[in-house]
Image: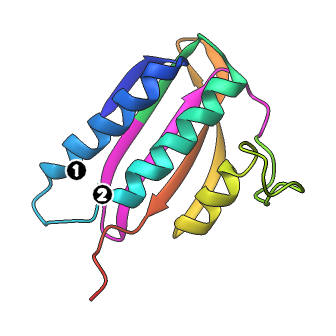
Amino acid sequence: MILRLYAVGEGARLARHLVRSVMATWPAPCDTDTAVTVTGELFANACAATPGRPVWIYVSWHQDGALVSCWDSNPACPAEPSLPADLLNETGRGMYLIHTLSLAHGITPETRDSITGKSVWSLVPTRRSS
């Protein structure tokens, strides 16, 4: 599924809802919470990088989990995954969460509609632990 949204606050809620809804249609039951959390973080990073601009959310089934990616029109890479120096700060830990929750993650330069940007992607586990 590919979803085009705009980098505004309400878009994050819609992106999370649609990822959960798409995953509910998959043939095997799966834990959607991690994918929804990662989607929210990816979208928040895109909003910070390109406020008000188009953002594409992509989710697909993968044998190891869900592949979630978010494209935005800013080709600059997000910060390396780390906790903020001030642990009470409410921002700055998105890539750390993505890194921690993912089986794999990365950044891929990508062009959409003749605009060069990047896709930040994450492969998240969907199997429920016993």
Look at the numbered discs 2 and 1 and tell me whether their residues touch, using CB distance below 8 Å. Answer: yes
Q: Percent from the top left, x then y, of residue 119?
A: 59, 37
Give the residue type at disc 1.
Answer: Met
User: Where are the magenta residues, as a range?
Assistant: 58-77
- Count of marks overlaid on the render: 2
Tell me the SS state at disc 2.
loop
Residue 110 in view:
no
Amino acid identity at mark 2: Thr
Q: Nearer the viewer, residue 4 or 9?
A: 9
Please rate how many residues cluster around mark 1, counting C-alpha atoms within 10 Å: few if below 14, some from 14 to 19, many from 20: many
- Does residue 84 appear to the left or right of 96 in the view shown? right
Residue beneath disc 2: 32
Q: Residue at x 29, y 36 (%)?
A: 17
Residue 59: x and y in percent read 35, 44
**In the rendering, at what x and y percent does residue 76 appear?**
79, 32
**Residue 61 horizontal/vertical position (percent):** 28, 55
- Of the 4 image quadrants, the one containing the C terminus is bottom left
Quadrant location of residue 30? bottom left
Q: Is residue 129 above or below residue 86?
A: below
Residue 102 in the figure: left or right of residue 106: left
Q: Which residue is mark 1?
A: 23
Decide if residue 41 is on the left or right side of residue 18: right
Left or right of 125, for residue 1: left
Which marked residue is nearer to the observer: mark 2 or mark 1? 2
State yes or no: residue 69 in magenta: yes
- Give the quadrant of residue 128: bottom left
